């Protein structure tokens, strides 16, 4: 039996399995994949200004039968738009493209470009106070970035979205998030396909009769981490969704714990100087 939306664990209203849309920039394909994901049961949709697909995401949501209030919708402000006035104007543009009056979560995409915590973060608070966003998030923030943001914000940081998968387990950020009460959201939770080629994950997948991506997603869920795997085909959308039915035994979780090799698949030149 396929899982239902009620089977997805949530944290403070955020479903812990979401649908990512990075690199899904063909409008019709993106809209169809979002509609399909919602029909399958996903209720957490993630996009970003730089993905250039917010309008397609909005069209996919509008085409589905799922009410907007049942969807946890997140986007991110790109690094060139992080000056205070630009945060406000481009968020309004994102809302228009997405066809919604509010966002459930708005992220600072990177602590880079025009990011100035003293100017950028008050603009996020202004959006929060106006009701245009329900939660403030950050993405690709290291502990020093988080420390400064928490000093400046009166509103709690809800989430930090980072690359996280069995080969990049982010222990430092996981410990920080636990202590600070910040949710971790994992992008590239399948290590951009690398999980498919891993012998250990392959053995575990064979044991349960599932795919390697399902093993990776189930491992993240066991760690209390929200995952937002991207997919375009209905087959992959459904396969990722089936990870909700997989309960890993402790011995298999421990085997995956040993797979960390600091494999970073997203490392732009404007990223932090000192990654974990």
Image: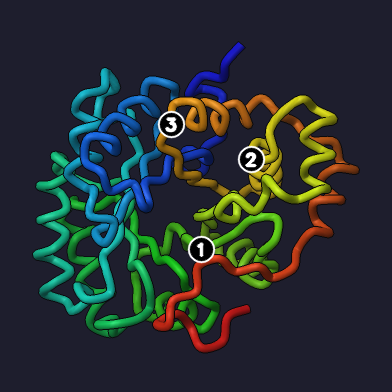
* Residue named by callout 3: 233
User: Which type of secondary structure does the marked residue at label 2 adopt?
Assistant: helix
Is residue 13 at least partly visible in the picture? Answer: no
| Residue at position x 59%, y 69% in the image | 264
Q: Residue furthest bottom?
A: 273
User: Which type of secondary structure does the marked residue at label 3 adopt?
Assistant: loop
Q: Nearer the viewer, residue 222 or 252?
A: 252
Question: Which quadrant of the rendered structure holds the N terminus?
Answer: top right
| Residue at position x 13%, y 66% in the image | 88
User: Which type of secondary structure does the marked residue at label 1 adopt?
Assistant: strand
Circle on res. 174: none
Q: Position of residue 123 (x, y in %)?
A: 20, 71
Q: Which is closer to the viewer, label 2 or label 1?
A: 2
Q: Residue furthest front?
A: 197
* Residue named by callout 2: 213
Is residue 118 at least partly visible in the picture? Answer: yes
- Measured in 3D between alpha carbons, the distance from the residue under mark 2 to the one under mark 1, in whole angstroms, is 18 Å
Q: Are marks 1 and 3 in contact (CB under 8 Å)?
A: no
* Residue named by callout 1: 162
Against 165, residue 88 (above or below) is: below
Q: Position of residue 58 (x, y in %)?
A: 20, 38
Q: Which is closer to the viewer, label 1 or label 3?
A: 3
| Residue at position x 16%, y 53% in the image | 94
Question: Which quadrant of the rendered structure holds the C terminus?
Answer: bottom right
Q: Residues within 10 Å of mark 1 (few under 14, many from 20)?
A: many
Q: Which is closer to the viewer, label 2 or label 3?
A: 3
Against 123, residue 133 (above or below) is: above
On the rendered structure, is 169 left or right of 124? Answer: right
| Residue at position x 40%, y 77% in the image | 149
> How many marks can you see?
3
């Amino acid at each position: 039996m396929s899982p239902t939306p009620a089977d997805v664990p949530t944290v403070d209203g955020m479903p812990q399995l979401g649908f990512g849309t990075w690199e899904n920039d063909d409008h019709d394909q993106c809209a169809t994949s979002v509609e399909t994901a919602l029909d399958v049961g996903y209720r957490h949709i993630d996009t970003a200004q730089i993905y250039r697909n917010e309008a397609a995401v909005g069209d996919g949501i509008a085409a589905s039968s799922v009410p907007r209030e049942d969807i946890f919708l997140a986007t991110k402000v790109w690094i060139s738009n992080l000056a205070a006035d630009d945060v406000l104007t481009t968020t309004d543009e994102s809302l228009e493209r997405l066809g919604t009056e509010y966002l459930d979560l708005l992220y600072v995409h990177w602590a880079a470009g025009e990011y100035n915590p003293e100017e950028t973060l008050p603009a996020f608070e202004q959006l929060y106070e106006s009701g245009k966003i329900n939660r403030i998030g950050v993405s690709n923030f290291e502990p020093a970035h988080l420390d400064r943001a928490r000093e400046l914000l009166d509103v709690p940081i809800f989430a930090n979205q980072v690359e996280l998968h069995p080969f990049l387990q982010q222990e430092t950020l996981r410990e920080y998030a636990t202590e600070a009460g910040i949710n971790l959201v994992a992008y590239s939770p399948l290590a951009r396909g690398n999980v498919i080629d891993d012998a250990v994950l392959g053995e575990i997948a064979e044991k349960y009769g599932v795919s390697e991506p399902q093993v990776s997603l189930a491992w993240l869920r066991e760690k209390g981490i929200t995952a937002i795997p991207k997919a375009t085909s209905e087959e992959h959308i459904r396969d990722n969704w089936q990870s909700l039915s997989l309960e890993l035994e402790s011995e298999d979780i421990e085997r995956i714990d040993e797979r960390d090799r600091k494999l970073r698949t997203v490392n732009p030149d404007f990223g932090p100087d000192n990654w974990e």
